[in-house]
Image (spheres, grey):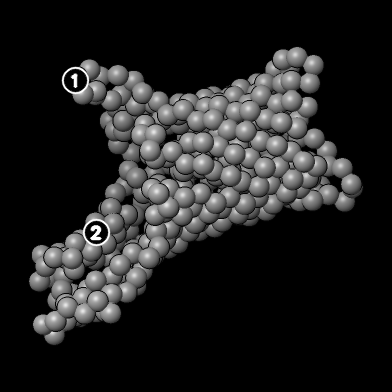
Amino acid sequence: MMKKNIFAFVLLLTAHWSYSQKYSNEFMNIGVGARAFGMGGAVIATASDVTSGYWNPAGLLQIKDNIQLSLMHAEYFAGIANYDYGAIGFKNGDKSAMGFSIVRFGIDDIPNTIDLYKNGQINYNNIKSFSAVDYAFMGSYARKTKIEGLILAGNAKIIRRKVGTFANAWGFGLDFGAQYTRRKWHFGAMLRDVTSTFNAWTYSFTNDEKQVLQATGNAIPSNTLEVTRPRIILAAGRKFDVYKKITCLAETNFSFTTDGQRNVLVSSTVFNMDPVAGVEFAWDNFVFLRGGASNFQHQTDIDGKRKLHFQPSVGAGLRLKGLTIDYAFTTITGQSSALYSNIFSLKLGINKSAAPAANTAQ
């Protein structure tokens, strides 16, 4: 029974990844950086640091340091899943910038019990472990245009997904981004997977493994192609002077998908619209307080009433010369407070001069 359950889990996992078009490469929609998590992910228009390589590569041209580095580690589902991110960004003069980002989402040490029962006997020494891991490698490029305040950019990304020795996939996709700034207003657009991202899945089982799968009523999957449909995000934000050294940056994003009906604020079989909103208060560009609202969904309560719920998030940040420490308290899984996570990320600015310039967009 245990052998059947573990392989049912593996096949369910790979089948979901392989055949689901709506939620293909969903790990790429989690987000990166505690600052963005604290704002609910509403940073498409105002992203202005190395994390822009993920959110909107046009923001790389807003980097004020010679080089920026960022690292993040988060754990979900009581440490079962590990989520890691690293990036580097730098400017090529005043007109262009480049960046490179790595994302890893994985579940490690999954028991493989296919050989638990062998030759008529149970042998626990035959239990091995494997990992189900998703990787994304992104190269970003941003460039100013002749239109004042307009920056255009793009990502080329390679997707690598692997489930033990049983299944693996390679994928390739493109993103396009833009930011336009006019006075204190910021506008942004992000076209993710604009050409669709294709993952080619292959499966490999030994003859003994195939016999076990067939004997336990599991289907043997065949090689297939997974497609991630385009997603369009439009954004607007503005920075306000509140009092002396206190400023407020507010932004709202609208994400549009056409890959089937989703449980979002505006839902239909033709297209879906999912809004997010975030705000950041800063004191002297030194201390930051953040809040956000995302994941708006209609849910039916226990009394049968249908209500609108959303996912709140909060965060804080501290900038010490070239080092920025950000924190967020949020979740990727919905309303249950038991599934909230503490997320920390670091950002390091490297400069030739002793004192880095302030980031005016944050």
Kind of residue sitting beneath label 1: Gly
Q: Name the element at disc 2.
A: helix
Q: CA distance from mark 2 to mark 1?
A: 32 Å
From the top left corner, tell me how far across and down residue 271 is, in percent. 35, 30
Kind of residue sitting beneath label 2: Phe
From the top left corner, tell me how far across and down residue 313 is, in percent. 50, 30
Residue wearing tag 1:
304
In the picture, the disc for residue 9 is 2
Residue 250 vertical placement versus 57 (above, below): above
Most foreground residue, 182 or 298: 298
Most foreground residue, 66 or 130: 130
Residue at the (46%, 54%) spot, across then down: 82
Which image quarter: residue 210?
bottom left
Residue 57 vertical placement versus 115 (above, below): above
Residue at the (22%, 65%) spot, across then down: 7
Question: Is the residue under label 1 in contact with that under label 2 (CB below 8 Å)?
Answer: no
Q: Is residue 87 visible?
A: yes
In the rendered image, which quarter contains the N terminus? Answer: bottom left
Which image quarter: residue 130?
bottom left
